[in-house]
Image (tube, rainbow, N blue to C red):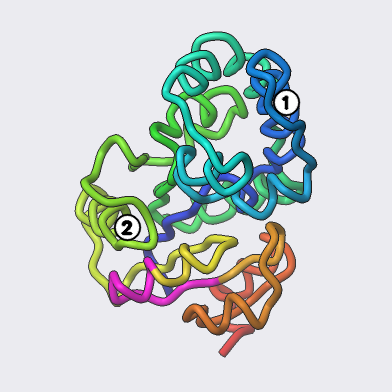
Amino acid sequence: MFRCVIFDFDMTLVDSSYAIRDTMNMVAERQGLPPVTREQVLSVIGLPIRESWMKIWNRFDEEWLTEFRALFLEQEFAGIFPFPGTVSVLEALTEKGVALGIASNRQSPVNPLKATGLSGYFRSVVGMGDVENAKPAPDMILKGMAELGFGKDDTLFVGDTADDMTAAAAAGILSVGLTTGNFPPEGLVGAGAWKVMDAIEELLPLWNGAAS
């Protein structure tokens, strides 16, 4: 069916919520900010980091981000783990000849991909630093499609947030919303999801003729 799949990263391929919570709380302790919960983190994962911190703390200081990146990224990466089924799905799609890409609202998803051992599956990796506009704009997806050499009819996008679904619709492609993040099925469908699934393994029947 699809010859190209572009994935979001956080809460789509990996559970990064605990690591981001712990890392943000290190920043909070150093800067005198309120501690955050995993539920708060889940509510903003997928947003650009400045916007997410504004939503949680109602403030943003560039110094916090500098500190976060300089001191805590190594610890954050160590606490990010692929969801069960992620590796087997990526391997199965690769064996089927499906081209794979990443479109993430991280500034750059390159290092966390390497840290989780997933980087070898992807021929295109696009972050906020590579485009003018973050999701829900379609820029990242369109860039990934261009790099992979596939058009709208050949490409599927998989993500876990409403912004992911909106970005895919703006790019003119179908999307699958995973409920592995913080969005309920109705929220994903309302944002334009073609299908909603509870686990990444549910993608594979799309290539087996078992899904319509």
Q: Which residue is mark 2?
A: 141
Query: Measured along the vertical axis of the image, is residue 69 above or below residue 203?
Result: above
Q: Does the stretch in magenta take in 9? A: no
Judge the density around disc 1: few (<14), some (14-19), many (≥20) Cα neighbours within 10 Å.
some
Residue at x 42%, y 56% (from the top left corner): 6
The label on residue 147 is none
Q: Does the stretch in magenta take in 175? A: yes
Residue at x 63%, y 77% (from the top left corner): 196
Location of residue 116 by image quarter = top right
Q: How far apart, in angstroms, are the residues tagged by discs 1 and 2?
A: 32 Å
Three-letter code for the amino acid on which mark 2 is drawn: Ile
The label on residue 25 is 1
Residue at x 52%, y 55% (from the top left corner): 93
Q: Residue furthest bottom?
A: 212
Q: Which of the two residues, 115 or 43, is positioned nearer the viewer here?
A: 43
Residue 49: give x, y in percent of width and height.
49, 38
Judge left or right: residue 47 versus residue 108.
right
Q: Which of the two residues, 111 or 70, is positioned nearer the viewer here?
A: 70
Residue numbers of the magenta segment: 167-176
Query: Measured along the vertical axis of the image, is residue 13 above or below residue 163?
Result: above
Residue at x 56%, y 75% (from the top left corner): 206
Q: Secondary structure at mark 1?
A: helix
Residue 47: give x, y in percent of width and height.
49, 50
Residue 204: give x, y in percent of width and height.
62, 67
